[in-house]
Image (tube, grey):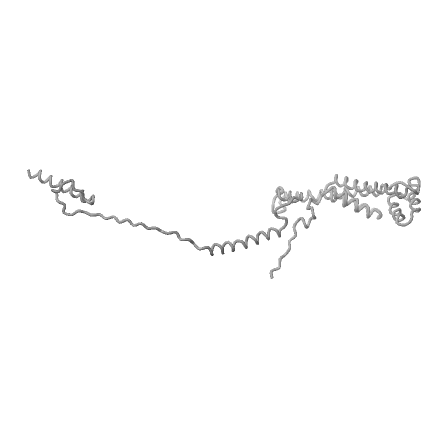
Amino acid sequence: MQATRKVSSAKDAGGSVGNSPYSVVRSVAGGFALAAVLWWIPFIGPAIAGYYAGRRSGSFIKGAISSSIGGGSLMLAVMAASYYLLGPAGFPNTAVDAAAGTLTGIYWRAGIYLELFFNPGTAELSLTPLGIMVAFGCIGGSLSGLYRREATSLIASGAVYSAIRPMARSVELYEKGKKLGFESYNDCESVRDSAVSAVPDARQRTAAMPMKKKPVTTTVQAVTTTVGEGATPTSSSSEKSQSPFSDILRRSEVRNNGREDAQKR
């Protein structure tokens, strides 16, 4: 039994959509999620969130924008939740830690989480973690752009076996999520196997078909030539011979006899 090896397509390896690894939308979403989860870790949490947002964006400017939007969206969400949960306890006139102390049950845990975003003993948001996130977003974006420029330079300088070529149209359609004829290497293998199996079938059908022989007609024309021998010079010219050669011989004999008669006279 022959074992078949499954070859995954580029779409399966890169995700369901198979787009470019650099995306501002995904960098903003990822930075927002990481900041919400890791914000409680001093310095390290916002730094990781910002670096991911910048590295995913692909450039310095996009990294700064992505990290700013992700961190700013989280700060707005925290402010809205604070007004909703801590408003009945006197927020923003009352400090966040004092207002959160009045909460009970699951709301008490939410109050502890909200305290991480405010300066201790105040109702003002702490902007230092947001600045750290934006700074590392710029660093991640710069490194991402540098990596792409280095790869382009290596290809252009001949560090690889082939020069830079424009992207094929099929690859562009594939990245846009368009449906193509071949979605994976397995599709090509199935087409190849079906084509190979069809060739012996066609040969067998050709061998099984009886060959029709065309009748060959051979026509043999017989030409009979009769040369009259001993033609008499006195025969009349109106007599017709069956062969043209006999007429020629008779005419030459008549001419020769006429010349001899003329010489004798």
Asked whether the viewer can see residue 210, the reply is yes
In this rendering, the answer to whether 250 lies above or below 213 is: above
159 or 109, which is in the foreground?
109
Looking at the image, residue 79 sits to the left or right of residue 188; the answer is: right
In this rendering, the answer to whether 1 lies above or below 56 is: below
Q: Name the residue rendered at 31%, 49% in the picture.
A: 219
Q: Name the residue rendered at 69%, 48% in the picture.
A: 16
Query: Residue 248, image x and y in percent?
Result: 18, 42
Query: Residue 32, image x and y in percent?
Result: 79, 44
Placement of the N terminus among the 4 image quadrants: bottom right
Rendered image quadrant of residue 121: top right
Query: Residue 11, image x and y in percent?
Result: 67, 48
In this rendering, the answer to whether 209 lies above or below 178 is: below
215 or 88, which is in the foreground?
215
Q: Name the residue rendered at 63%, 48% in the picture.
A: 183
Rendered image quadrant of residue 246: top left
Q: Name the residue rendered at 17%, 47% in the picture.
A: 228
233 or 7, which is in the foreground?
233
Asked whether the viewer can see residue 164, the reply is no
Placement of the C terminus among the 4 image quadrants: top left
Farthest residue toward the left? 265
Number of on-image labels = 0
Query: Residue 185, image x and y in percent?
Result: 62, 51
